[in-house]
Amino acid sequence: MALFQQHFWGYEITYPDDWVHATHGEVEAFAMHTQALNVEYKGAHMGYLLVRGEFNPYQKPIEPLWGQHLTKIAVMHAAKKVGSAPFQVGNAKGFEAELLLPRRDDRRMWVGLLSAGGIILHLMVTHRKAEKEEFQPVVSRMVASLRFAPQVEGVTLSPGGMPLPKGYQRADPKSVYPQADASSEWEAYTGEAASGALQIFYLREAPVYGWEALAFYPYPNTDPQIQHGQLVLHKDGRGAVIHILPSGQIAIQYMEVG
């Protein structure tokens, strides 16, 4: 079995060695072959599993979120809701349901919503009705394998000792965060992750590398004055503030603490 680890959201999932995985924006997709990941493909073994992470900074109850999500998916696919049931994988809890697609659509569809801390995972499985016996047991084991890792691979450290997400490149602090001033030491990095995914990344990874979290101001925030995510940290007499911008860029401010 192969192991996939989502670098930002921190979840892991195992899948068969002969299956394929692809990233489409914020969605991770798993299928029996590459063609099945093309939405236009209608041939054999067209089934797939999709997983998408979402930031839930205030840890809102999942029940109303599930109702909204299920209704949205049903409307998108002109499907009927066939009831829902409690759903738990590891320490993540939520709900699952099968949707009854229109008769002309020769597919089965299952959706799930899981909540763990400040993370919500959206899951969707679809496959041909005639391929249920071949596809469903495999994908059920994949879903059951889902876990959150205490830390992820591929993390490097900045010159200031702050963990950096994979794929992020150093940039001029002023170009990323115009408020950066000469009274502090600054680092800045650019990449393509969503702001919520970066906030989850730093909440998990900064403590792994010895940084103690003193305060966290999530974005989006109920306070309109907070325009981006901020994580205030301390390590060995040194302070740091990570500014996580809605664009997915990062500015890190260091200061000595007396």
Image: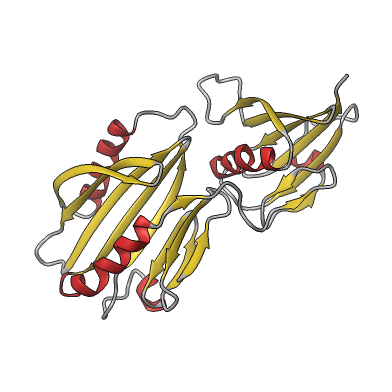
Residue occupying image coordinates x 25% and y 51%: 76
Colouring used for the render: secondary structure
For the N terminus, give its image quadrant: bottom left
How many numbered marks are there?
Answer: 0
Q: Image quarter for residue 173?
A: top right
- Report the front residue among 114 and 109: 114
Residue occupying image coordinates x 26% and y 63%: 126
Looking at the image, residue 241 lies above or below residue 136: above
Residue occupying image coordinates x 61% and y 37%: 203
Instruction: Describe residue 41's horizontal placement relative to residue 185 as left or right.
Output: left
Looking at the image, residue 9 lies above or below residue 254: below
Residue 124: x and y in percent read: 31, 56
Residue occupying image coordinates x 74% and y 41%: 176
- Report the front residue among 97 and 104: 97
Looking at the image, residue 57 lies above or below residue 137: above
Question: Is residue 16 among the parts visible in the rendering?
Answer: yes
